[in-house]
Image (cartoon, rainbow, N blue to C red):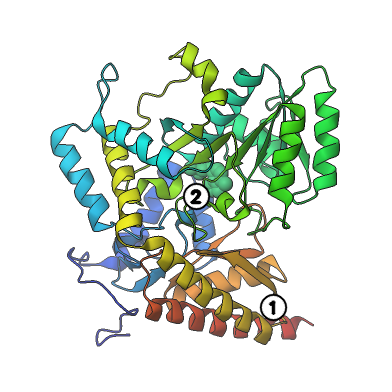
Amino acid sequence: MDGAGLRRVPGSPAWTQPLPADPEATAAAAVLRMERYTGSAFARMLRFMGMTTLEWEAAGAVVRDVHGNEYVECGGYGMFFHGHSHPRVVEAVRRQAGLLAQSTRLLPHLPQVELAERLADCAPGALRYSFFCNSGAEAVEGALKLARAATGREDVIAADDAFHGKTFGALSATGKRMYREPFRPLVPGFRHVPFGDTAALAAAAADAAGSPGGLAAVLLEPIQGEAGVVLPPPGYLAAARRICDEHGALLLFDEVQTGVGRTGTMFAAEQEGVAPDVMAVAKSLGGGVMPLGAFVATPEAWAPFDEAPFLHTSTFGGSPLAAAAGVAALESIALEGLLERARAIGQRLDRGLHEIAAGHRASIVDVRGRGLLWGIDLRSEGAGGLLISRLLDAGVLVVYSLNRPKVLRVMPPAVATTDQIDFVLEAIDRAAAEADAVAADLT
Ligand SMILES: Cc1ncc(COP(=O)(O)O)c(C=O)c1O
């Protein structure tokens, strides 16, 4: 807390925007209007969790709310590898806005071409051709369409608890029933197998290959994010590669959450030495500033799109502004050593979170992760709610895992300082102690 009773975090930036005169009233009125015009569910949840504030300004790893309290960003659904408003990305977008903000769509523009070239340079294996879109779900959707067009087959195998987005195709691959049931019938031809079980994948692939539709693709996250940060057993992704090759099916990797540095390498699949035929990316690709997604494919997989350029299109996808942000995002990673930084922070989190877990066995079952993607697996969803709100009070933003809410995800940016990471670890330790005490009261 500073002199005015406001909570500060280490390395707080020099804020530029004035706060409203009456923050309490501003926040309350915003929630009421939100309820009135965007529905009540989110507002209800905020009230239930006692969250009565608005995000106001952010820079680097720090967010400031409408009251002037500060938080270390470890959430953002994983899109802030570069932190908030990374200066290089913001400057690139500003420059591009003065030059050409949107594309004519008839003529090519430089930012998109440059981004495609940079992605081909850093993507695993023979991935080369990029299609740009605006979100992770769109990237997965495009990858699925390409797989069917490239193989002339129908079936897709995805993993239980996988999260690929909520458009119809991506949702059909998503492994959580609750998100799927209200929208049936979904896209036909999808089946799910337990993540990490090679024998189950091989059996499902053989079955699909022998079915009338045939096996088009296997779609996997190299590390499952929304399932609660689930790491594949060693050799699993390589086995998936072999199984796809055996059946002439495509291997699709969804690196929407894991890609662009999040796990300490540019793409998580690199750490397993496996390259897919098509890779979906989004989130951090826009540098935490612009919405940007892409799917990147090998020339062989891309063949149907080469024959018909309008087979898959998007008005806004890869706009000059978004592409300029993407170029600057990739440039920053190289120029600022952000992958090395992510790995160093990852080691600190690995050590710190394991120590915390060992000291709070009543509430924490396990911690796991890689680089800047960590999951704290709690004994109950209730403990998750308690931890989120205690961490919020302490100045740390973390998020649930959508498909397994009892796992909290800790996803700091690569620009976070050592002091900020230690601040986060200390806050988690204190919050876990409270969760332990509650767990003890309940037993
Ligand atoms: C692995 C993965 N794929 C796809 C998506 C969907 O991305 P979006 O929310 O941008 O549509 C997400 C979002 O969390 C994700 O984690």
Image quadrant where one finds the C terminus: bottom right
Q: Amino acid at mark 2?
A: Gly
Q: Secondary structure at mark 2?
A: loop
Q: Which residue lies at the image location 72% right of the left edge and 57% below the top edge?
A: 234
Q: Quadrant of residue 249?
A: top right
Can residue 161 be seen in the rendering of this structure?
Answer: no
Residue 339 vertical placement versus 330 (above, below): below
| Cβ at disc 1 under 8 Å from ligand 1 | no
Q: Farthest left residue?
A: 98
Q: Secondary structure at mark 1?
A: loop
The residue under label 2 is 259
User: In the depicted view, which residue is nearer to us: 173 or 40?
Assistant: 173
Q: Amino acid at mark 1?
A: Ser
Q: Residues within 10 Å of mark 2 (few under 14, many from 20)?
A: many
Q: Which residue lies at the image location 57% right of the left edge and 79% below the top edge?
A: 351
Q: Is residue 271 left or right of residue 189?
A: left
Q: Give the mark nearest the N terminus, 2 or 1.
A: 2
Q: Quadrant of residue 174?
A: top right
Find residue 363 and name its label.
1
Residue 23 vertical placement versus 176 (above, below): below
